[in-house]
Image (tube, rainbow, N blue to C red):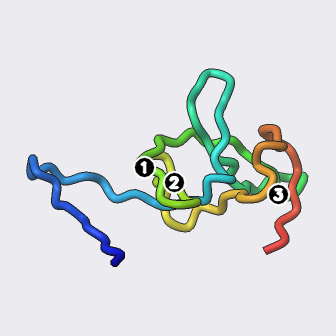
Amino acid sequence: MIGSLQLANAGGEIRPSALLVPLSAVVQAKDGTYGVFLVSESSAGEVARLHRIEIGAVNGTDISVVNGLQAGDRIITTGANLLKDGQRVEVLQ
């Protein structure tokens, strides 16, 4: 038998909604904070910009981002650990 359970927040606090992103998109900065690379437009074309985030719980191969991202942000999910801030990228999908 397999079950699933979600519990309401016992303290009655309202938690902010979180976005789920693949674990492969999250990188750790030198100062120990976490971030994702967003695709940004520049005069040279599309570039990767490191954007700091606050992470939450891991759910399988995804992780929740509780602060720092908005719905619709274009994040780099493959090869993020190989990128540098400001590096030119080509979006394939």
| Residue at x 68% of width, y 23% of height | 30
29 horizontally vs 60: left or right: right
Label 1 amino acid? Ala
* Numbered disc in front, either 3 or 2: 2
Image quadrant in which the C terminus is located: bottom right
User: Which one is earlier in the sequence, the residue at label 1 or at label 2?
Assistant: 1
**Label 3 residue SS:** strand
| Percent x, y of residue 42 | 81, 52
The residue type indicated by label 2 comes to Ile
Of the image marks 3 and 2, the number of the one nearer the N terminus? 3
Looking at the image, which residue is at 76% across and 57% down?
A: 41
Name the element at disc 1. Answer: strand
- The disc placed on residue 63 is 2
Which of the two discs, 1 and 3, sits closer to the camera? 1
| Residue 57 disc label | 1
Q: Look at mark 3 in the image and give the residue it sits on.
A: 46
Spot occupied by residue 57 in the image (x, y as percentages of width and height): 42, 49
Count of picture labels: 3
Q: Earlier in the sequence, mark 1 or mark 3?
A: 3
Type of the residue with mark 3: Glu
What whole-number distance in Å separates the C-alpha atoms at marks 1 and 3? 30 Å
The percent coordinates of residue 33 (x first, y second) are 56, 30
**Numbered tag placed on residue 66 in the rendering:** none
- Give the crowd class for mark 3: few <14, some 14-19, many >=20 residues within 10 Å: some
Distance from label 3 to label 2 (Cα)? 25 Å
Give the alpha-carbon distance from disc 1 to disc 2, as whole Å: 6 Å
